Image (cartoon, helix red, strand yellow):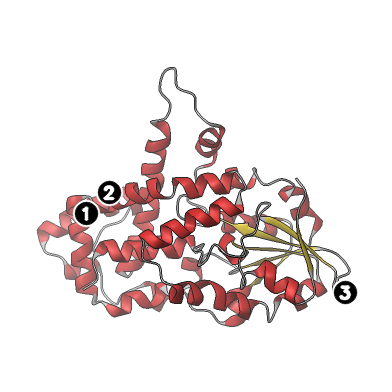
Amino acid sequence: MKSLKTILLYIHILFLSITICSASNSVKDGFLWKISGNGLNAPSYLFGTAHGGPFLAGQAAMERVPRLNEIFLSVNQLIAEKKIDNSSSLNKSDLEMDSTYADYLNKEDQIIVDRVLRTYLNTTSDKIKLKPLVLTSRIYKKKSIEIYKEILFAKFKPNTNVDSITLSELKYISEVEMDVQMIMRAISLNYSIIGLDDLIGHINPKRTISNEISYKQQIDSLVCAFKDNSIDSIIRHQLKSYEAVKNAYFNQNLDDFELQMIELDLKNNVTAEYNDMILFDRNKKWMEHIPKLISEQASLIAVGAAHLPGQDGLINLLRLQGFTVEPVNH
């Protein structure tokens, strides 16, 4: 049986979706790139987002990207990984079990689970049917917000200098991820919104993980995590591990970001096969649609940052098809 720590690691990686396979073909100059040439009537743009993980203040991160706001207003179409956030795009059968959690719990465990559910989701075990992995994801995200605020506030001590990143994050900490914030803004501007994964029929691996383990096993692991607060300790460890990655992103240093993610891949035993499945294979399938989309409308392509660099990254794949791809001048 997979441990809860393993399941939570899957969740964390799937939230982030920005793992890197190799340091070769590294790309410098930030996360915002201009696409021109090859018959385009107007330039389009490619932006590497940071979704999930430690990036709990997406608006603060976006404000550190030079000219992003100006460029957002210069296009009339947003091309994202999905039209809406992953959890909202799932069908009811993907999200829910046939029975409630109360059917799986003894009285002692039900008290423990109800305490957590009331705190984070304002519900109880006799009312909720969310599949264990989905429930774990939602509690994980809410606990991450709670713990991250605690970590940031701890930096405010007498006679201690607090960096500008911390100040920005405190203002914008939110459960709404950067990609979703961009989609919400595109909706407010009446832009066309295209979901690349919708076009290629990509199924998030998160959907299949829970099928490998029985609901009873998953729920038992979740109860144990609630009892010993292991979710909290895992979150604290991961937030600490991703600090260097987060700082590289906030500082708009794609080279450093790539190197830090390579280190995390090694620590987390992320395989090249997994990267191919979640990252590079999708890039190649997306490229079957992107040239046509940007030839029809000036677009901002906003996808996870690790989709940009490397031999099979979008920057190189666009160049191989004859487009000029260059960093936006700061």
Which residue appears at 46% of the width and 61% of the height?
15
- How far across and how far down the image is residue 39, in percent? 88, 74
- Where residue 226 is drawn, which disc sits there? 1
Left/right of residue 136 with respect to residue 264 in the rendered view: left
Quadrant in which the C terminus is drawn: top right
Residue 128 visible? The answer is: no
Numbered label attached to residue 39: 3
Q: Residues within 10 Å of mark 1 (few under 14, many from 20)?
A: some
Instruction: Identify the mark nearer the N-term, 1 or 3.
Output: 3
Kindly report which numbered mark, 1 or 3, lies closer to the viewer in this rendering.
3
First along the sequence among labels 3 and 2 = 3
Q: Are marks 3 and 2 in contact (CB under 8 Å)?
A: no
Query: Residue 273's x, y, as percent?
Result: 44, 77
The picture quadrant where one finds residue 188 is: bottom right
Is 327 drawn above or below residue 320 in the view shown?
Answer: above
Amino acid carrying label 3: it is Gly
- Amino acid type at circle 2 is Ser
